[in-house]
Image: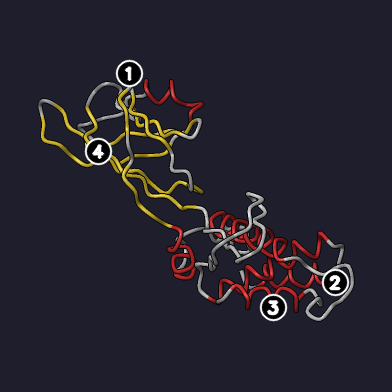
Amino acid sequence: MLNSTISIKMKERLNKLDSQDFDNINCWQIVESFNKAQVEWARRQLHGLNIVKEGDEQSTRRKDDLQKLLINEPLQINKKDLYYEGDIPEDYLQWKRVDIDANKDCCDGRRMTVYLAEEGNLNQLLRDKSKQPSFEWGETFATLINDTVHLYTNDEFDIEGASITYYRQPIKIQITNCTNPYTGIISTQEVQCEFKDDIIELIIDEAVSILAGDIESGNQFTRTQQSAERSN
């Protein structure tokens, strides 16, 4: 769907398509509200905030809708005392998994199963024989702290390579010759929404709800918010 179509639909939902009053919607407001709505929509799908508590990959629809945001990238890691450290990608939105290839002097290399653990339980996990990193069982754990991933080895094995699979932030749309609300610079290129049209329709309702709340338009706020949730 073209950005021009998104703009028309949003103005139509707000009853501002042919308005000449001081409540006209500027292009930067459309860009900001739509990009904010994309993130809100994505987080709601991942969390499963609906009547059946359906989160990511728990149905065919969720898998289909969210696959656009699910990517895998190599993870550059550095060795520390009891763990390896890698930086979280800048467009990171939510964890999915980490894969690591480990080796030990006495044994052949193997792919390890990595569980995401709580940083607060670190000391207990390293002491617990059933949960601490084990090359023999092919299992270890990772924690997230200060925009980094810590992959624990307990100094029992080495990690040859790692990759991270995660949900990234949606690409922000841009409208040519419109001031970018995030940088304050006039956009010189058109960046279209990456989602398919049926999802864009839901995001439009979400964005209109945001704008309607900003301009205190109660009827449009209620209708579009209910529409976005009902079609979730």
Report which residue position mark 1 lands on. 81
**Mark 2 Cα shell of 10 Å, populated few (<14), some (14-19), many (≥20):** few
Which numbered disc flags the more N-terminal residue, 3 or 4? 3
Which numbered disc flags the more N-terminal residue, 4 or 2? 4
Residue 169: x and y in percent read 52, 53
Label 2 vs label 1: CA separation? 59 Å
Report which residue position mark 3 lands on. 8
Residue 209: x and y in percent read 75, 65
Label 1 vs label 4: CA separation? 17 Å
Report which residue position mark 4 lands on. 161
Q: Quadrant for the C terminus, please.
A: bottom right
Report which residue position mark 2 lands on. 219
Contact? badges 3 and 1 (CB < 8 Å): no
Residue 4: x and y in percent read 63, 76
Q: Nearer the viewer, residue 121 or 94?
A: 94
SS label for mark 3? helix
Q: Residue furthest top?
A: 81
Residue drawn at the location 37% of the way across and 20% of the way down: 127
Q: Nearer the viewer, residue 174 or 157?
A: 174
Contact? badges 1 and 4 (CB < 8 Å): no
Judge from the rendering whether residue 68 lies leftward or rightward of residue 35; answer left or right: left
**Mark 4 Cα shell of 10 Å, populated few (<14), some (14-19), many (≥20):** some
Q: Nearer the viewer, residue 143 or 78?
A: 78
Q: Residue furthest bottom?
A: 18
SS label for mark 4? strand
